[in-house]
Amino acid sequence: MREISRPVAGGWLDELEIGALGPTDAEDALGVLARGMRDNPVHVGVFGEDPEARQERLRRVFEVAFDAMGWQANMLAARGPDGAIVGVCGAMAPGECRMGLGQQLRVMPGLFSNGPRVAVKAVRWLGVWARRDPDERHWHLGPISVDSHLQGRGVGSKLMEVFCARVDTAGEDAYLETDKAINVRFYERFGFEVVGEQEVVGSPNWFMLRQARGGDGSS
């Protein structure tokens, strides 16, 4: 079922549409992810200092994960007035965020395609995140990204409104990881709380949980 966000004052944002990612949208979504998350501290630490090389390496990893983890099934897309994808919000349903052996085998070639040194750092990074993943039932938010030239204009907030409404309707907890302090404050606005912090490949990472709320938005 297609989800449409409620209008929010702000001109261009009034025409932004939030809905499911279509079957032919994978390439556009991957581009938004790679461009929007290129300069995240962990990605700099793992994929190197050169921005163009980092973006391409990150895109290759996202492409493999997109297929192996089935991101398309629950990924939301924000579309501008012309229909172009300007932001995406990934989410994995309860029980689906931990990779099985088969998924790991599919992801590893993508990691090593960037070279062994990058692969070792990526495995270290993803290993920390996997160990932090709660045992309790939860929706796992991420990756969420807004195209680099449109960040700070409210696109991420609109994606989060739809995601939070979805988990509230289901009465489920939600969990995420972030490597940017500014994102911590952003997610706190939507009810997430920091439940852990750890340095990962030289950068602080925060682990955040949003407890289940009822369909009326109450906790």
Image (spheres, rainbow, N blue to C red):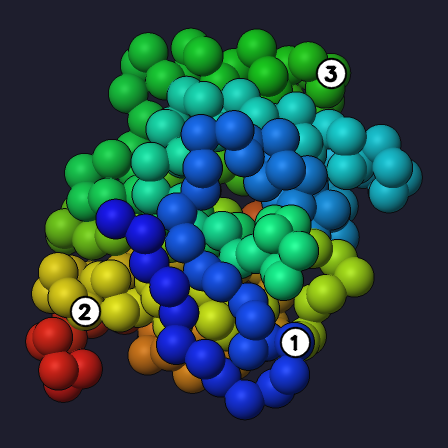
Q: Is residue 149 visible?
A: yes
- In the displayed structure, 36 sits above or below 166; it is above
Point out the frontmost of discs 2 and 1: 1
Q: Is residue 214 left or right of residue 90?
A: left
- The local secondary structure at tag 1 comes to helix
Quadrant in the picture for residue 210: bottom left
Disc 2 target residue: 168
Residue 193 on image: x %, y %: 35, 75
For the residues bearing labels 3 and 1, Cβ distance under 8 angstroms? no
Q: Is residue 126 left or right of residue 133?
A: right
Point out the frontmost of discs 3 and 2: 2
Quadrant in the picture for residue 155: bottom right
Instruction: Compute the Cα span from label 3 to label 2.
Output: 42 Å
Disc 1 marks which amino acid?
Trp
Disc 3 target residue: 115
Disc 3 marks which amino acid?
Gly
Disc 1 target residue: 12
Quadrant in the picture for residue 180: bottom right
Disc 2 marks which amino acid?
Asp
Question: Counting residues from the N terminus, which is met first, the one under dot 3 or under dot 2?
Answer: 3
Q: Nearer the viewer, residue 139 or 169?
A: 169
